[in-house]
Amino acid sequence: KGKNIPKERTIDQTFALLAEGYNYLPNRTYRENSNIVQTRLLGQKIICISGEEAARAFYDEGRFIRKTAIPKRIQKALFGEHGVQVLDDEEHKHRKGMFMSIMTHESLERLEKITKREWRAAAGNWTKEEEIVLLEEAKVTLCRIACEWAGVPLYEDETRERARQLFDLVDSIGGVGPRYQRGRKARKQTEKWVADLIRQVRDGRLSPAEDTALSIIANHVQLDGELLEPDVAAVEVINIIRPTVAIAYFIVFGALALHEHPSVRERLREEDGTYSKMVVQEIRRYYPFAPMLGARVRADFLWEGYAFKKGTLVLLDLYGTNHHPDLWEKPDEFNPDRFKNWKKSPFDFIPQGGGDYDKGHRCAGEWATVKVMQVFMELLAKELEYEVCDQDLSYSMVRIPTYPESGFRMRVLNLKP
Ligand code: HEM
């Protein structure tokens, strides 16, 4: 029997979660001055944990499984069913190996080239517009980048529609009602589209380059010697192109960061890639995106004297860990320089999960995300002359995921050659 875990006394906290959003978990751990609190959400007992040691425990495979941790409603919109997110043990490692084989040095260089070309092409068009909404432009440009990189054919006249669908999958996460329903609909539309591409690759009607996600996933052989079902292969290809489009959220926050911190913009103009990397890290730390992750206790264990019972759902606070006062000095200040002395723990800076890429569930696309953001931040600071339109740039801490509602309206005056 372990120590007492601080508890929420109310019967069910689901409304509180909806009302407090990103701050729900931090509000409770700070109030209790404890990295562990117990609550009830959607009718079940849940243990919430926060901080570096909590992340280390959460990514200890012997302690947790994912199989039954992700609610069906999230699988039916955001993730799809039977994808890498709900696998454990050997099956997970084998599938994760498939994803990591897409992230080679050569493949990331190809991504960088495509990204540079597409951002500049897009920016050239922005100079011809009275003003643009960056969020909308980022979705469409990232959709082009994602599909070309992944070997997914994309016709010009379907680009906007596909970009919207891939974005809607992500935007549905914390949605109830119409926002969630848009995600459900986008799930059906994108899976039908991509499952058909998988069939085309398999019967030779479509030949994507060998190192693309589409080719690798269509030809991936499972541990039982079989190819993935076309629907599951589609889920996994979408696990590449959907989050690439989702970088749009960070792009908008990146533009906001430069607007609010002109000195960061100045330094980006003058300094090399080391600084833009720190800026990108700080954008991913500071601004809210993925709020928390869930896993279930595999078998009873004690952590820091607290008892975790088999089957209990445990939530790891990603946003709260990235703002944890024990880990970050003045966590609520935007300061890229803090990454100069960062000790590179795999468990303290976890906007895209923590731990090990190959053995655990940490985001397969983290390096790709950093690359794409670095290219964009350098374009913004060094190559674009623009004015930010008058608008309300505040963003909700309750909506998940969040962004400034105006989408960041700007007037682009010039693109330097
Ligand atoms: C997993 C966040 C971009 C592919 C994850 C996880 C998070 C995350 C929180 C879960 C980690 C876990 O379960 O322990 C993000 C954010 C992104 C992003 C905030 C920024 C837009 C990308 C990109 C790709 C990608 C660009 C692919 C090109 C994946 C895959 C997984 C994953 C395949 C599943 C890994 C597994 O279950 O083993 N991501 N991600 N993500 N991400 Fe990302």
Image: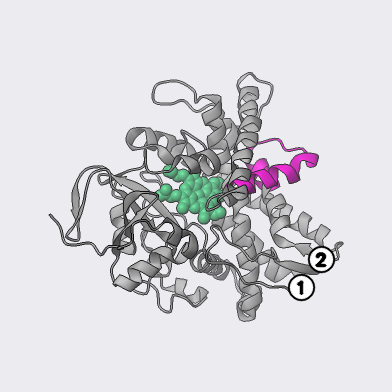
| Residue 12 vs residue 250, the one in the foreground | 12
- Which secondary structure, mark 1? loop
Q: Which mark is residue 131?
A: 2
Regarding residue 362, the answer to whether it shows in the image is no
Tell me the crowding category of disc 1: few under 14, some 14 to 19, or many 20 or more residues within 10 angstroms, Cα based. Answer: few
Is residue 300 covered in magenta? no
The residue carrying mark 2 has its beta carbon less than 8 Å from ligand 1: no
Whether tag 2 and tag 1 are in contact, CB under 8 A, the answer is: yes
Vertical comparison of 363 with 185: above or below: below
Disc 1 target residue:
389
Q: Which mark is residue 316?
A: none
Query: Which quadrant: the N terminus?
Result: bottom left
Residue 37 percent coordinates (x, y): 29, 62
Residue 249 percent coordinates (x, y): 61, 59
Q: Residue 392 sits in which quadrant?
A: bottom right
Label 2, label 1: how many angstroms apart (C-alpha)?
8 Å
Residue 284 percent coordinates (x, y): 52, 63
Vertical comparison of 45 with 67: above or below: below
Q: Residue at x 60, y 43 (%)?
A: 181
123 on left or right of 57? right
Query: Which quadrant: the C terminus?
Result: bottom right
Label 2 or label 1, whichever comes before in sequence order = 2
